[in-house]
Amino acid sequence: MTAEEPAGTAGRTIEGTATGVSATPGGASVTEGGAYATPGEPPTTPAGAPATGLAPASGTGPGADPGPAGTWVLSAAAVRRGDRLAADAGLGGPVLMETAGRTAATLLWKVAGPFSAREPVVVLAGGGNNGGDGMVLARWVARWAGPAAVKVFLLAEPGRLRGEAAVQWSLLARAGVPAIALAGEPAPGAQQGTRQNPGAGAAPVAAEFPEPGAGRQPTAGPAGAAGPHPGAGLQPGAGRPAAAGPGSGVGLAVDPFLDHLEAAVARARVVVDALLGVGVRGALRPLAARALEVVGAAGVPVFALDLPSGLDADTGEAAPVVPRATWTATFAAAKWGLLLGQGPERAGQVFVVDIGWPQAAGAGGTGGEAEAGAPGGTGGFPAARVLDAAGVAALLPRRPWDAHKGWAGHVVVAGGRPGQVGAAVLAGTAALQAGAGTVTLAVPAPVRTEAAVHRPEIMTWALPATAGGEWDAAAATALAEREGERRGRVVRVIGPGLGQSPGAAACLAQWLGLGDPSAAGGPADPGPAGGPPAGAPAFPPTVLDADGLNLAARLGIDRLRERPGPFPLVLTPHPGEAARLLGWTTAQVQARRPLAALELARRSGAVAVLKGAGTLIASPAGDLYVCTRGHPGMASAGMGDALAGVAGAMLAQGLEPLAAALAAVFLHALAGELAAPAAGIPVRATELIARLPAALELVRRGLPRGTEALGVPGVAWLRPPLAG
């Protein structure tokens, strides 16, 4: 047995694995080739952070285009399925839990260490697998910094522990890690305490913690194998009687337990929230809520394991007592609840920890129904991939040295009714800043002068209008004729400031090929041999936004599949527009955002961008992506117009609709971050548009990958900082 192997694991091998290699419970992880590698060794001195080698994070590796090296977002049901598949491959509970806990301990040391008896780690552990992960973490911190540098509070009765949690509680005792548990029927030699005398006998207290076993599937373990633990350093005051013997500890009634927890948290450097995991849903039990209130009131940094306790793993719904974590180490894959609802605010910085799921089916980790081996999507919400800068950089077009403006395409923005010219101007300016070769604003004739004065680089076309300045139905044919005079690639952005007049509705139906076909223009005339067509196609690639979406909802989203070709189409609705398209309520869209995005794409036969915090991009084929970048200050007027313009520019430069949408969403979000002066201060659309070239340069130059930004093997940073 090496110095790094916990007792009872030396020489153990994994049965049934494809590789047949030995297990390394102190930190085994799966490499791209399927072999196992140890993440690294602990420091040679207690004050140093754990030294680490290189290993990919869960789902990282080749073939994960265009997501961030295959980082997945999963539902709680899919995570459980992944754990079952891991167990079927011979990677049972002991290996997964040891890997999760040790890698999380390494990450904790990196972001919050070093630790000592004066600035300890307090671990609030539950009776299930999340608590077991926390106990592994505590054992490794104690190994690196000494037992006095960590204190464990088990919000469960040791005698009721089962499976891996019971094993880890026993290993804590062997490692001499100080711990306090709830009093119940104590194990032999343990003491119970009261508020006045923690060493005196107290009446048994029933555990308030949910039944153990939620989350990862445990392997068989000894029932009640928990041993009592040393209680040194846990009492708020002096004079607590010594434990009954070596390896014994203290079981406390509820009030004394919470008193000791409060005192320990007050002097802690960090609190590890290992109370509840993905297996717990619904209202918190009273004792769990009280313990979380103690943690939240202390104002101490919180390091959550898997997700903040009480946060719904799928929806991101959170009770008021759910602590606001500074960091969250989530295991195997990101969870939807960390990205939706209150999740981003409660989770802080999110890191995805590789726990060694087998990767036989591809970059996603466990195989199954989803593309490229994404594990599951079988329950709750479907699986998705997270966008990162490296994936987007691979999509961006490379402009040749001898490029001309025709190479970068021509974006035509159709919109700008009286009173809403600014929307069209914002979309056109964003397209220009994002690299389009030529931009034209196609507007009703009465507002042409107003549209032309904003940017001298942008052309304007005056189209037929009604006496009131609204769009006339004849404008559909007029626009197609003007586009037909252009050479090269033409892209339409329809909707910013379009209005919902009868004339605008008639134009949209014709532009989508759902009205009078002759009114939209005929096919393009063939150009010279080897050159582009002499005129633009009748139905060029199109971005549909704002009033274009509202009018499409009147036509019926399913009719969009009837468009000729069908030509490339990207929809960019906000939740209200998505609700109108789907016939849902806005609340229903927000509660089921991943499903809503996929439904938009499926029913329209188009790429759908569901805007909002955690913008989602879906394809008709079932691909789903989520963007974790952006800034809350982007909730301001004109942001959607800017995004539509960027998407148009990406299409104009030759990207396919899905790639164009992915690149546009990421660049738009990144520009918003660059433009934001401080959290919570609104970002003006014009400020964001001005930062688009900087965002493009930043992506092309290369932001740190999620797996590289932190430097901890087996850990991917979901949203690495823009600098440093």
Image (cartoon, rainbow, N blue to C red):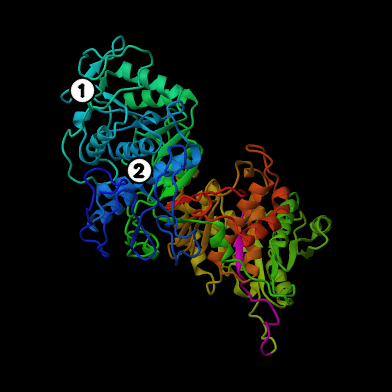
Circle 2 crowding by C-alpha within 10 Å: few under 14, some 14–19, many from 20:
many
The three-letter code of the residue at mark 2 reads Gly
In the image, what residue occupies the spot 45% across and 40% down? 109
Q: Main secondary structure of the magenta part?
A: loop
Residue beneath disc 2:
101
- Of badges 2 and 1, the one in the foreground is 1
**Residue 58 against residue 104 in the figure, above or below:** below
* Label 1 element class: loop
> Which of the two residues, 131 or 39, is positioned nearer the viewer here?
39
Q: Compare residues 198 and 293 and report the one nearer the observer.
A: 198
Residue ID for mark 1: 245
Where residue 313 appears, as percent x and y from the top left, is 38, 42
Circle 2 sits in a helix, a strand or a loop, which is it?
Answer: helix
Give residue 478's quadrant in the image.
Answer: bottom right
Q: Looking at the picture, does residue 601 appear above or below residue 100?
A: below
Residue at (36, 44) in percent of width and height: 102
Front position in the image: 107 or 390: 107
- Residue at figure coordinates x 70%, y 58% from the top left: 693
Q: Is residue 249 above or below residue 674?
A: above
The three-letter code of the residue at mark 1 reads Gly
* Residue 98 drawn at (x, y percent): 31, 46
Residue 342 in view here: no
Apparent side of residue 513 relative to residue 152 in the rendered image (left or right): right
Residue range highlighted in magenta: 529-546
